[in-house]
Image: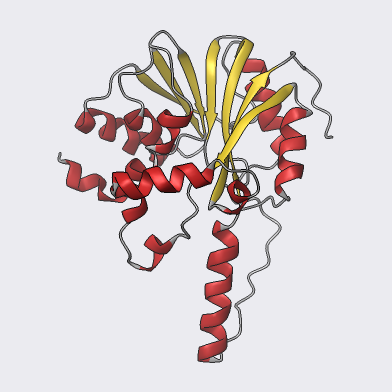
Amino acid sequence: MTKDKFQFLKGKLLSGRVYPEFFPFHPDDRVINLGCGEGPQAIVYAGQYREMVGIDINEDRLKRSKEAMEIYGVESYTTICANVEQTPLRAGSFDKAIAIDIIEHVKSPTKLCLEANRLLKENGELLITFPAMHDKFTGFVSRCGRFILRRKKKETPTTEWNPDAHNQEYPLDEWIKIVESCGFKLHKSRASTLFPPLHLYGIPRFWFASDLIHRVDSFFSTMPVLRNWGQALVCIFKKQKSITSEAEP
């Protein structure tokens, strides 16, 4: 096996440099990765944690993640196939939690946040991302393309939950309220990047690959107002209290 087999991960590994910069781990930390997929965060954070446990509902992705960890030489990473809203893990057993590009996919954002609260130790911290301008940009490009080509949007209505689809949509302030209603307090936030998702149209992620551009982008991505206009809003929450109720806010 070679890294070329995981070419599809390279973009995530490059953009993932944001997370350790913004949310560093302690070498003794036990980390829960909710919605881990193929495990790019385990690779990005490799060597910076004592143990990371990845949870994902897709067993095929977890099998691929095991191969990826072997290829990239990542140790102390294990996975469990389960729904992130209800895991089989012991309460209060993790120092930090990460939930990257997952909350918009779940059936109940509240249950996801309550589970993160349950799994974290007292004063534990949660890194979570919320969709911001990414979908708005791609939707705008798609509408422009259909207008130019005079094509109508294909409607595929379904009532079935699809974990790969974006099933939830809220304004950013509502996303934050949902998390805080589950026993957390927002500590700080930033945009993942202020550049639009140009990589979807064949343009290399130069805004992450160039250290200079990345530093400038990161500076503006932390500024009030501007940080809400990135591809995603990256937030750090601190656990304030334990909550066991599963009531929706």
Residue 223, visible in the rendered structure: yes
Q: Which quadrant of the structure image shows residue 17?
A: top left
Is 12 rendered above or below residue 166? Answer: above
Residue 178 at what x, y percent from top left? 76, 35
Relative to the observer, which residue lies in front, 69 or 194? 194
Q: How many marks?
A: 0
The residue lying at 75 percent from left, 21 percent from top is 183
The residue lying at 26 percent from left, 34 percent from top is 67
Residue 39, visible in the rendered structure: no
Q: How is the structure coloured here?
A: secondary structure
Residue 62 at what x, y percent from top left? 39, 34
Residue 25 at what x, y percent from top left? 43, 18
In this picture, residue 163 sits left or right of residue 212: right
Residue 249 at what x, y percent from top left? 84, 34
In this picture, residue 22 sits left or right of residue 64: right
Q: Quadrant of the N terminus?
A: top left
The residue lying at 52 percent from left, 38 percent from top is 100
Relative to the observer, which residue lies in front, 223 or 150? 223
In this picture, residue 72 sits left or right of residue 98: left
The residue lying at 52 percent from left, 89 percent from top is 148
Q: Which quadrant of the structure image shows residue 69?
A: top left
